[in-house]
Structure formats: C-alpha cells, structure tokens
Amino acid sequence: MDPLLRSAEAIASAHSVIALTGAGISVESGIPPFRGAGSLWEKIDPMEFAHIGSFLKNPEKVWKGFLVGMKDMLDKARPNDGHMGLVALENLGRLGTIITQNIDGLHQLAGSGDVIEFHGNFAWQRCMDCDGLVPSSGLDLSSLPPRCACGGIYRPDCVFFGEMIPEESLARSRSLASSCDVMIVVGTSAVVQPAAMIPVIAKNSGAFIIEVNPEPTPLSHSISDRFLQGKAGHVLKTLAETVKGLIV
Ligand code: OAD
C-alpha cells in the first residue's frame, strides 16, 4: 500500500497522535537546518558559538557571531505548509501535542495548541543575574551583549549545548511518547539526544512511527514504520488532506 495512504489510515484510526519536529520543518520558512549542506553548523562551530561554556566565557562574541543573526532570521520567519499541515491535523481532532526541538515559535504562530519546546524558545531573553524575562522583540542590541536594567547579561531562554533539557518538558515528552498510538517525526536528523530517544520510546511502547524527511535518517530503516520521503510542506499538506478524506 502507498506509504502516505497507510500513514493517513494509521492517523485516522488512532486514539492518540503526537508529533516530534526538528529544524527541517522550518527550512521552507527560510531558517537553515543545523546539519547538512547550507546548514548553520557548516558556517559556525557549535562548540564555539552554541555551547554554554563559550557563552559564559565570551557573551559578546556569541551575541555578535551567532545570536544577532539568529534573531534577525527568526524575526522574519513565518509558518509554512508543514506547520499548517500539523494545524490541519489538529483541527481534524487527529493530532495532540507537538514536541519540537525548534526555538522559532512557528508552531504556535501557525495555531498549534499544545507545543512542548524541548530546547526552549528564542522569543524570550532571560537576565543571567535577576532571572527577569523580556521579549526578544523589545531587546536593545545597540550595545552587545544586551543587558538588563539590573546590569545582568541577557541570554536567550533556550537550551545551549552543555545544558539540561527543562525537566518538565523531558518528563512530559517521555510520558506522551510512551502512551501514543502514532508519532509523526518531521525534519529531524535524530542525532541529538535526548530528543532522538523520543521516537525510540514511542516505538518500544508499540506506537506506529511515521517519518517525514527528504533524506533518510538513523530512524528511517529501523524505527520508522513508514518513511515519507519529501519536504515537510508538501508531505504534511497532502497527509492532512488524505486523513480528512478518510474521516469525513
Ligand atoms: P538538523 O539540522 O540536525 O536536521 C534537519 C533535518 O531536516 C535533516 O534530517 C534534513 O534532511 C531535514 N530537512 C531538510 N529540509 C527539510 C524539509 N524541507 N522538510 C523536512 N525535513 C527537512 O536539525 P535537528 O534534528 O532539529 O539543538 O537538530 C537537533 C538539534 O541540533 C537542534 O535542536 C539544535 C541542534 O544543535 C541545540 O541547539 C541544543
């Protein structure tokens, strides 16, 4: 049977469907992925610019060389057909929580109702001294690193390499993964832990795993029940339309 139709049937007949998304779902919104051709880590070394140790050592360098550019890019990005495909599935009552590794806030902007931000969100900056939060949109970047009124340095409210995943996000994601019937895994290279374990937990708990990616990943031939090869925008739009056709 056609893998997309088989996936749509699994979604249409499941009690609990969740999704795990990675950078690939936002590529069609103009945000480059972290790995592969044209990727961010091809241009800058993550250990030099995205590790908490590097930030603490030289916040000015990390703001100048990485975070200002990231902010510009995220300010401009808008949801694409991939994000909207997941919203369409949710509106059909066929998708619950989205666990995302992305910090771009595009699932929420698209209209998804329950999003676990595994690596935090760039929309907020946290003062490293007083813990005060400000929206990134109101951040004064005229002098770097940006500072809070208390004098403390702002950092994005995201997880840097070398930091722990927020405990609540991790616990909730594990629990949802172990109780879902279907997991849709979109646009992740599935190499960064502990996010990469989430589909494995779901599979070991009996879930049907649908993977959407233009390229095979370590999950594709072992964990994924169906591999829908292609870009998230086209595949998720078609998947949502096919599910709709099956349930109405
Ligand atoms: P990666 O950049 O590692 O992987 C992106 C995936 O998206 C690859 O498998 C691509 O083949 C796929 N892809 C590219 N274009 C796509 C498209 N149009 N539609 C669907 N898929 C597409 O991104 P993540 O797996 O999200 O963490 O990376 C995980 C973590 O590594 C990130 O959250 C970040 C990074 O270092 C931190 O910064 C802590």
Image: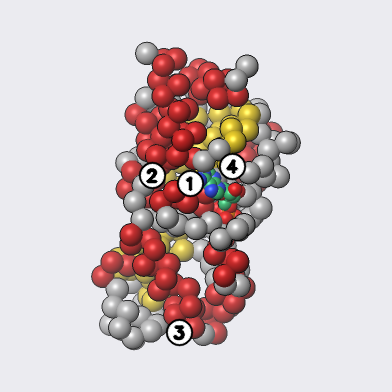
Q: Which residue is mark 2?
A: 80
Position of residue 236 in the picture relative to residue 229 (left or right): left
Residue shown at the point (56%, 61%) measured from the top left: 39
Helix, strand or loop under label 3: helix
The kind of residue tagged 3 is: Glu
Residue 60: numbered disc? 3
The quadrant holding residue 40 is: bottom right
> From the Cβ of disc 4, is ligand 1 less than 8 Å away?
yes
- Tell me, yes or no, whether the two marked residues, 4 and 2, touch with CB atoms within 8 Å: no
Q: Please, what is the three-letter code of the amino acid marked with disc 4?
A: Pro
- C-alpha separation, residue under disc 3 versus residue under disc 1: 30 Å
- Residue neighbourhood size for the residue with mark 4, other residues' Cα within 10 Å, grouped as few (<14), some (14–19), many (≥20): some
Q: Who is closer to the viewer here, 234 or 23?
A: 234
Does dot 1 land on a helix, a strand or a loop? Answer: helix
Ligand 1 closer than 8 Å to the CB at disc 1?
yes
Gap between marks 1 and 2 measured at Cα: 8 Å
Residues 118 and 43: in front is 43
Mark 1 or mark 4, whichever is nearer to me: 4
- How far apart are labels 4 and 2 at the CA level? 16 Å
Tags 1 and 2 in contact by the CB under 8 Å rule? yes
Question: Could you say which quadrant of the image residue 46 lies in?
Answer: bottom right
The x and y percentages for residue 98 are 46, 41
Give me the C-alpha separation between circle 1 and circle 4: 11 Å
Residue at the extreme left: 138
Where is residue 33 shown, x and y percent of the image?
A: 53, 56
In the rendered image, which residue does mark 1 sit on? Answer: 25
Of discs 3 and 2, which sits in the foreground?
2
